[in-house]
């Protein structure tokens, strides 16, 4: 299997950690990774800032986590597309960490937000949509975590024919052979409550990304968590295309294809 697809499919949210702090080697790798703007940038040109936070020093915890000692928080200026950009940049870190054997889980809801925001130094005009622990997965998941995964069916995903459309909303699209892995990478992306709100309409060779909205994910404080999800999906798509030795240009220009009322156009990707 393609190495990136393997990374994406094998990654699981980790909520039970083994209490070991990151090794010096891994800590410096993560710091070096975050200090390189090529790693943290996104196609929307919106800077995302990452802050590493010692859990003990700042009194940080989450009711769904155990055994963690380090967090990473992400901050972004409040503006259109900040959430999509955030999803893209943060997910790249999540995948990089996983290749090192470091577990993460996107946390946008299950935390005391004020405590994290103070620790991360969130300024006026900024938001801190999500954080993640960084640590080594425990051999066994906590019962709480196992039950949670079951409840949101975290090990399964919606089938491609209900996500990817041919020219019009709802008409199933079958990707050409070389692109099949790229679509699998999108399908296996993580999302808030595993709702998988991304949809793609392929028309005239262009991949148009949409958000299919559920109620209750959009607010002033976190931005729209489901736009973050679409940013994650775009990240997987672009990395997948890169893996094929090609590049995809991201533009924002609504093609005007008819879509359901609870949906919104996000961006179009053209493979060069
Ligand atoms: C934007 C976003 C926010 C999330 N917020 C939380 C959260 O607050 N608490 C939590 O336990 N998991 C959270 N998750 C993790 C998802 O529940 C998880 O990614 C999804 O169930 C799929 O499982 P997997 O990551 O193991 O593939 C979030 C994921 C995303 C993408």
Image (cartoon, rainbow, N blue to C red):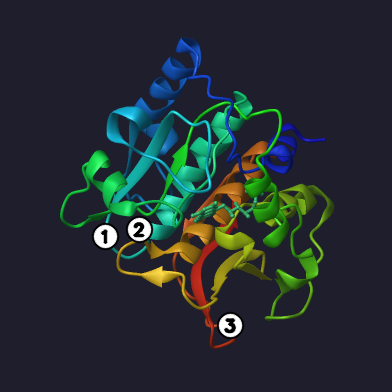
Q: Residue 257, labelled with which disc?
A: 3
Furthest toward the top, the residue is 24
Q: Position of residue 171 (x, y in %)?
A: 77, 79
Marks 1 and 2 sit apart, C-alpha to C-alpha, by 6 Å
Marks 3 and 2 sit apart, C-alpha to C-alpha, by 24 Å
Secondary structure at badge 2 equals helix
Secondary structure at badge 3 equals loop
Q: Residue 82, labelled with which disc?
A: 2
**Vertical placement of residue 172 versus 30, above or below:** below
Residue at 79%, 48% in the rendered image: 178
**Vertical placement of residue 123 versus 22, above or below:** below
Residue at 43%, 25% in the rendered image: 33
Q: Position of residue 4 (x, y in %)?
A: 69, 36
Q: Nearer the viewer, residue 36 or 106?
A: 106
Q: Earlier in the sequence, mark 3 or mark 2?
A: 2
**Does label 2 point to a residue whose CB lies under 8 Å from ligand 1?**
no
Q: Is residue 25 left or right of residue 136?
A: left
Residue at 40%, 20% in the rendered image: 32
Furthest toward the left, the residue is 124
Q: Position of residue 258 (x, y in %)?
A: 59, 87
Tell me if residue 54 can be seen.
no
Q: Is residue 47 left or right of residue 243?
A: left
Please state which of the two labelled residues, at mark 3 or mark 2, is closer to the viewer. 2
Residue 218: name its quadrant: bottom left
Quick one: label 2, few (<14), some, or many (20+) residues within 10 Å?
many
Marks 1 and 3 sit apart, C-alpha to C-alpha, by 28 Å
Please state which of the two labelled residues, at mark 1 or mark 3, is closer to the viewer. 1
Find out whether the residues at labels 3 and 2 contact each other: C-beta distance under 8 Å. Answer: no
Residue 82: name its quadrant: bottom left
What residue is disc 1 on? 78
Q: Nearer the viewer, residue 84 or 251?
A: 84
Find out whether the residues at labels 1 and 2 contact each other: C-beta distance under 8 Å. Answer: yes
């Amino acid at each position: 299997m393609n190495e990136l697809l393997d990374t994406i499919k094998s990654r699981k949210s980790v909520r039970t950690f083994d209490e070991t702090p990151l090794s010096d080697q891994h800590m410096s790798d993560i710091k070096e990774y975050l200090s390189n703007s090529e790693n943290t940038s996104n196609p929307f040109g919106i800077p995302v800032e990452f802050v590493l936070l010692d859990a003990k020093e700042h009194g940080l915890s989450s009711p769904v986590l155990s055994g963690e000692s380090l967090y990473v928080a992400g901050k972004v200026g409040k503006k259109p597309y900040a959430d999509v950009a955030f999803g893209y940049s943060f997910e790249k870190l999540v995948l990089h960490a996983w290749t090192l054997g470091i577990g993460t889980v996107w946390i946008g809801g299950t935390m005391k937000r004020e405590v994290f925001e103070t620790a991360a130094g969130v300024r006026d005009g900024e938001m801190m949509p999500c954080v993640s622990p960084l640590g080594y997965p425990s051999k066994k998941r906590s019962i709480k975590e196992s039950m949670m995964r079951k409840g949101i069916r975290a090990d399964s995903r919606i089938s491609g024919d209900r996500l990817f459309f041919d020219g019009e909303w709802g008409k199933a699209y079958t990707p050409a052979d070389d692109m099949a892995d790229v679509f699998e990478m999108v399908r296996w992306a993580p999302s808030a409550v595993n709702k998988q709100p991304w949809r793609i309409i392929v028309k005239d060779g262009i991949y148009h990304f949409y958000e299919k909205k559920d109620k209750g994910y959009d607010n002033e404080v976190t931005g729209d968590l489901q736009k973050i999800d679409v940013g994650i999906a775009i990240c997987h798509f672009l990395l997948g295309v890169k893996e094929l030795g090609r590049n995809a240009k991201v533009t924002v220009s609504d093609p005007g294809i008819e879509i359901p009322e609870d949906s919104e156009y996000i961006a179009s990707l053209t493979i060069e």
